[in-house]
């Protein structure tokens, strides 16, 4: 039986459209025009034409943020993916932890990334749940009224290095050095942070769960379902997929599974596909190695 962790009225989410200037030397974005609510933002997420994938100026609907979160477990590295049913694109994909960047965090998208990790990736350990820490800052504990977060144990996040080409908000170089791409089908700019999740030494039998908010009537509801963790470990070299329950890797059938556009081929600053089949992505990785 799914457990309700949170039920609240939707906040007044606002974001801002962007102007993006890209070249081979780097990418710069800045806010443009008036704030948009969620419905107005979705209405602008329509295909945009860009001729030169390396050098362009364009107006985009929004800024998004993703985290390629790497977990080292039993001698191997895995990327943490979550399942999402994308109503705006009418599909079901495995994706990186990600979210929309609100207007007041356009210059601090790393803060949005930390919030998304805290909300979407839950780690059960012993008789409680692990809080997280990045450098000198604690991550939020969004479900503290429903879950027991441990006081004497936590996971750490470490930066793994950034993109090869600088990304700026106005004149400001972004903390964490994310890589970036413009997704043409949705006219959006996506930043991708590369981080490592380090479990505490005493965490030998962790279980991972994904929680995501959904709108039910006039309320945002977040539920935890122990029978459907909806979070996976993808081994990046060979494309093997697992879940992690009580410290044990459980293989997952990859047939008919799709990955989100961040796994698709990137041309310059552009990604043109909506999604890519996991089997196709795995074949491409193996052919390139």
Image (cartoon, rainbow, N blue to C red):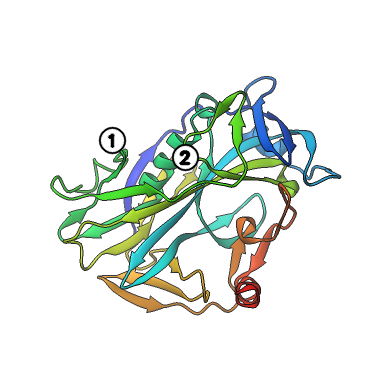
Q: Look at mark 2 in the image and give the residue it sits on.
A: 176
Q: Position of residue 173 (x, y in %)?
A: 55, 30
36 w.r.t. 176: above or below: above
Give how far apart the Cα atoms at labels 2 and 1 are: 14 Å
Would you identify the image quadrant in which residue 202 lies? bottom left
Q: Is residue 69 left or right of residue 107?
A: left
> Which residue is disc 1 drawn over?
136
Quarter holding the C terminus? Answer: bottom right
Using the image, determine if residue 4 lies above or below residue 144: below
Above-or-below relation of 110 to 276: above
Circle 2/circle 1 CB separation < 8 Å: no
Q: Where in the figure is residue 159, as x and y percent of width and height?
A: 41, 47
How crowded pointer 1 is (Cα within 10 Å; few <14, some 14-19, many 20+) is rated as few
Q: In which quadrant of the rendered view does residue 77 lie? A: bottom left
Q: Is residue 124 left or right of residue 241?
A: left
Name the foreground residue: 240 vs 172: 172
Q: Residue at x 43, y 51 (%)?
A: 160
The residue at the point 69 percent across, 35 percent down is 61
- Nearest the camera: 116 or 84? 116
Q: Quadrant of the N terminus?
A: bottom left
Mark before the other along the chain sequence, 2 or 1: 1
**In front here: 67 or 125?**
67
């Amino acid at each position: 039986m799914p457990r309700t962790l949170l039920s609240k009225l939707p906040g007044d989410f606002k974001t801002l459209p962007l102007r993006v200037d890209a070249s081979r030397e780097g990418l710069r974005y800045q806010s443009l025009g008036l704030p948009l609510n969620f419905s107005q933002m979705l209405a602008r997420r329509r295909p945009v034409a860009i001729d030169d994938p390396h050098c362009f100026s364009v107006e985009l609907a929004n800024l998004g943020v993703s985290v390629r979160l790497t977990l080292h477990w039993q001698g191997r590295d895995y990327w943490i993916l979550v399942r999402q049913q994308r109503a705006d694109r009418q599909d079901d994909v495995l994706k990186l932890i990600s979210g929309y960047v609100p207007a007041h965090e356009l210059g601090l998208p790393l803060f949005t990334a930390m919030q998304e990790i805290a909300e979407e990736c839950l780690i059960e350990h012993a008789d409680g749940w692990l809080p997280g820490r990045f450098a000198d800052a604690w991550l939020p504990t969004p479900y503290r009224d429903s879950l027991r977060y441990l006081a004497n144990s936590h996971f750490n996040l470490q930066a793994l290095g950034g993109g090869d080409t600088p990304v700026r908000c106005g004149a400001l170089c972004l903390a964490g050095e994310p890589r970036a791409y413009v997704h043409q089908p949705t006219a959006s700019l996506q930043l991708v942070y590369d981080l490592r999740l380090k479990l505490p030494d005493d965490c030998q039998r962790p279980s991972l769960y994904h929680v995501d908010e959904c709108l039910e009537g006039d309320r945002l509801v977040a539920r935890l379902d122990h029978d459907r963790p909806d979070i996976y470990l993808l081994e990046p070299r060979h494309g093997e997929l697992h879940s992690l329950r009580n410290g044990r890797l459980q293989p997952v059938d990859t047939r008919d599974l799709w990955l989100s556009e961040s796994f698709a081929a990137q041309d310059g600053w552009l990604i043109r596909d909506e999604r890519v089949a996991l089997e196709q992505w795995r074949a491409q990785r193996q052919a390139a190695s």
